[in-house]
Every structure is written in C-alpha cells, then in structure tokens.
C-alpha cells in the first residue's frame, strides 16, 4: 500500500536546501550550526553514518528498522501539540538507493499542507543513493518536486554537483557551498548554482558561500563555520 500526503496547500513556499562540499568541508557541521534547523522543528533524518547524535540540543531518536522508524515518525507527526522532534533512519547496510527510497516513501506519507509545522527532511550521502544524474525519481523525486505543497522541506547533502540529479542543483532555492577539491567541480557548481567561479574555487576548508530565497539575484553571503 502506498500512503499519500494530504491537504495540498499552494500557499506554502519552497524551502528546500542543498548542501554541497568535498568530504570534510563542513557540510554536516553547517546543517547543525546555520539555523537551517531550529530547536522546535520537526525533523526526519536519513543518517546512514550516524553523523547526528544530537541536533539543536535535542537527542536524535534513531531506528535501524524501517517499520519502527515509520511508526515513530507517524505518531510524532500526529501528536496534537505540534512539538519538535528529531527522528533518524539509519539502515544497517548504510547509504543505498533502496534505503533512501524506503525512507522517502515514509516521509512522503507524512506530508500535510495543513499541519502546524513543516517536516524538515535531512538526507545525507545523496550521491551514494541516487541512480541517475538526470531527473530525481521515485519518492525522493516526489518530495523535491511536490513536497512544498505538503510542508515537506528537503535538506539535500552531497559532495559533488555532477553526482546528483539536476532536479536538485537546478530547482532548490537555498544553497550552501563549501570547499571543492577539484577545479572542475567548482566550475560545474558555479554554472549550476550561479555563484562566481573564483569564489568557489578559492574557498578554504570550513568557509562557505550561502544563498537563500531572500537574496536578490546575484547576491550571496560568505561565512566561516565554528568548530562544534
Ligand atoms: N571551523 C572549524 N574548525 C575546525 N574544525 C571544524 C570546523 N568545522 C568543522 N570542523 C570539523 O571538521 C570535521 C569535518 O566536518 P564535517 O561537518 O563532518 O564535514 P563534512 O560533513 O563535509 O564531511 C568535523 O570533525 C568537524 O568537527
Ligand atoms: Mg558529513
């Protein structure tokens, strides 16, 4: 059986994020630090390498079993108070396309355009879990292209732009870019995400460029992460 999201609401705005940078550039730290996620938020995480023990001061409840993860997420979403939670799916076999798709199927069913709170959806190691660099497919694709109306806000984390579907690089309004090891990767991101090439190429470790829905065209901010 496929469960569907409910109450499509066209007034909701698209709040997806992409977080891209070489290994060790600070992507996971950025997600924890940059207020992409806040204390009272409702968050589901695909966390195959156990990067999130805590998030915004709250303990992350972790499940290796998909049915248990689904049960925990459905009941936390259904609670009337709309309280914040952080619930992770960490399959024993790590980051695989089947694992991500199973996670996305559960998350998709949690969408509700009339819910008090959006559901933020953190997805780590995306490049290992997608099978195409063309269009995003399956429930992962549904979340990216249709999630907005149901209050689903994806946070897509990966190392190189070429490894993930164009649906991510082309359509996501909020972008965090960390250090890139290869000139070619910096060039690709500068074209796809519309940042100046030299700004990306010369980024030191833990430094980043960020552009959100609120920036005017061509504008962006720069920053450096703190050590957590
Ligand atoms: N500003 C910083 N100064 C020193 N170390 C940092 C800083 N930011 C992050 N780190 C450390 O660098 C390592 C890699 O960061 P991480 O966020 O895990 O990178 P990624 O997710 O891109 O692989 C972590 O151990 C983290 O604690
Ligand atoms: Mg990481």
Image: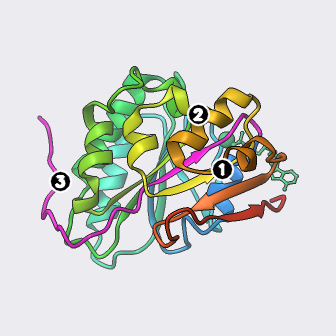
Q: Earlier in the sequence, mark 2 or mark 1?
A: 2
In the rendered structure, find residue 196 and report the number of the disc placed on it.
1
Q: Which residue is mark 2?
A: 188
Residue 95 visible in the current orientation: no
Q: Residues within 10 Å of mark 1 (few under 14, many from 20)?
A: some
Is the residue marked by circle 2 packed among few (<14), some (14-19), or many (20+) residues within 10 Å?
some
Q: Which residues are magenta?
A: 1-24
Instruction: State yes or no: Cβ of the residue under disc 1 lies below 8 Å from any atom of ligand 1.
Output: no
**Rendered position, 29 above or below 163:** below
Quick check: is 128 in the magenta stretch?
Answer: no
Q: Residue at x 17, y 67 (%)?
A: 10
* Quarter of the rendering occupied by the C terminus: bottom right
Q: Is residue 224 above or below residue 187?
A: below
Lower sequence index among marks 2 and 3 = 3
Q: Which labelled disc corresponds to residue 5? A: 3
The residue mark sitting in front, 2 or 1, is 1
């Amino acid at each position: 059986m496929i469960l569907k999201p409910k109450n499509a609401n066209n007034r909701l705005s698209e709040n997806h994020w992409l977080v891209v940078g070489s290994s060790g550039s600070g992507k996971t730290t950025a997600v924890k630090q940059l207020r992409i996620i806040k204390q009272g938020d409702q968050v589901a995480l695909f966390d195959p390498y156990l990067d999130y023990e805590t998030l915004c001061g709250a303990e992350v409840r972790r499940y290796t079993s998909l049915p248990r993860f689904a049960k925990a997420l459905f009941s936390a979403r259904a609670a009337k108070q709309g309280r914040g939670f952080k619930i992770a799916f960490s399959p024993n076999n790590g980051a695989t396309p089947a694992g991500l798709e199973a996670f996305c199927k559960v998350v998709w069913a949690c969408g509700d355009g009339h819910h008090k709170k959006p559901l933020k959806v953190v997805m780590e190691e995306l490049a290992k879990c997608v099978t195409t660099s063309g269009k995003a497919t399956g429930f992962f694709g549904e979340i990216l292209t249709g999630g907005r109306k149901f209050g689903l806000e994806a946070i897509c984390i990966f190392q190189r732009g070429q490894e993930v579907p164009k649906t991510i690089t082309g359509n996501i309004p909020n972008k965090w870019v960390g250090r890139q090891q290869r000139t070619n990767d910096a060039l690709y991101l500068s074209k796809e995400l519309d940042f100046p090439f030299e700004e990306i190429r010369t980024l030191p470790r833990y430094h980043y460029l960020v552009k959100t829905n609120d920036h005017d065209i061509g504008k962006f901010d720069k920053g450096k992460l703190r050590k957590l």
